[in-house]
Structure formats: structure tokens, C-alpha cells
Amino acid sequence: MSVEIGKKVPTFQAQTQFGDISSNDFKGKITVLYFYPKDNTPGCTTEAQDFRDHLEAFKKLNIQVIGISKDTVKTHANFDQKHQLNFPLIADPEKEICQMFSVMKEKNMYGKKVWGIERSTFLFNHDAVLVKEWRGVKVPGHVQEVLQAAQELI
């Protein structure tokens, strides 16, 4: 099942650095789910820090922020601790959730074709229905744009 605007979040269960998480955790809260390529890389670190720096604004509005990449729970725990992110990071090393959201794309890296995560963000309403998506995200200004869109759902 692939994600579509106007449809409920696909069913999944996964692990974060804080423990279990599932699509059921989206119900009753506005949820920002953002996909990023890799922990501790420059763009991904900047994006995570931007979400961290705006986390209180999201929390005041009862909006949860969740990151996800192909990294392991251990790598996420180190990334979280190093940058004091304080929001869950889903480990998807088998790329199952990434495939549900169609974020795996072919990229050129040092002249070689590789498959990786296309930086993408998904916004779900209180009923766990997808209301907005951003694909091919550029980091500068993105978190502010997501926060503004989420505020419009309140």
C-alpha cells in the first residue's frame, strides 16, 4: 500500500531509539513524518537540528515530529544523543516503510548510481489522514514551512 493525500497512514510497526512505534501512534495528534537519507551527514544533521530547534513550537500545538531513515536504532540513539534531538527516529533498515511512502530513489553518488532516500516530509491530521507532502525537500526554510502548514490544521 502506498501513501496518498486524503488516505490514512499505511499500517506499520517499527522501532525508534525510544522503543516501539506504530501507525496507531498517529491517531489523535497532528503528525509530521520526515524521511532523511542518513544520520550524521551534513544536510540530515541540519534538518534534524532545525526540527529540534522548533520542537517546542510543534509540541505547544500538540504536533508530534518523527524522523525516519534506513539507519539502525543504535545509530539513531547516537545521533539523538549527539544532537539532543528529543524526538523519535524510526529505524527502517529493511526499507519497508520507505517503500510504502515511495521515497526510495535512484541517485548519482560519485559517478555511481545508488538507491537512497529522497528527503521527504508528510503531514497527517488528527485522524491520521495525509493532508500534505513535500518531496525532494531542500533543508533551508523547510521546517518553518511545515510548522506553518501544521498550524493551519489546528
Image: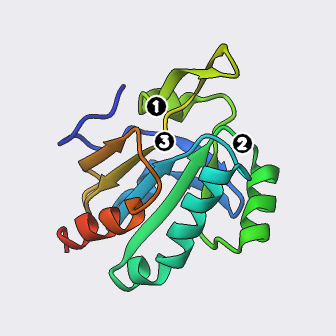
Observer-nearest residue: 56 or 9? 56
Alpha carbon separation for disc pair 3 and 1: 7 Å
Q: Quick check: 92 above or below 115?
A: below
The x and y percentages for residue 153 are 19, 68
Please say if the residues under marks 3 and 2 sit with CB atoms less than 8 Å apart: no
Q: Quadrant of the C terminus?
A: bottom left
Give the side of residue 53 with respect to residue 39, left or right.
left
Q: Report helix, strand or loop for mark 2.
A: loop
Residue at the image point whose x is 33% and y is 45% from the top: 134
Q: Residue at x 30, y 45 (%)?
A: 133
The earlier-in-sequence mark between 3 and 1 is 1
- The residue most toward the front is 111
Task: Give the residue at mark 1.
Answer: 103
For residue 57, what is the image quadrant?
A: bottom left
Q: Which amino acid type is marked by label 3?
A: Arg
Marker disc for residue 119: 3
Q: Label 2: which residue?
A: 71
- Residue ID at (56%, 29%): 96
Apparent side of residue 4 relative to residue 98 in the rendered image (left or right): left
Q: Tell me where residue 92 appears, x and y as whole percent.
A: 64, 38
Above-or-below relation of 101 to 124: above
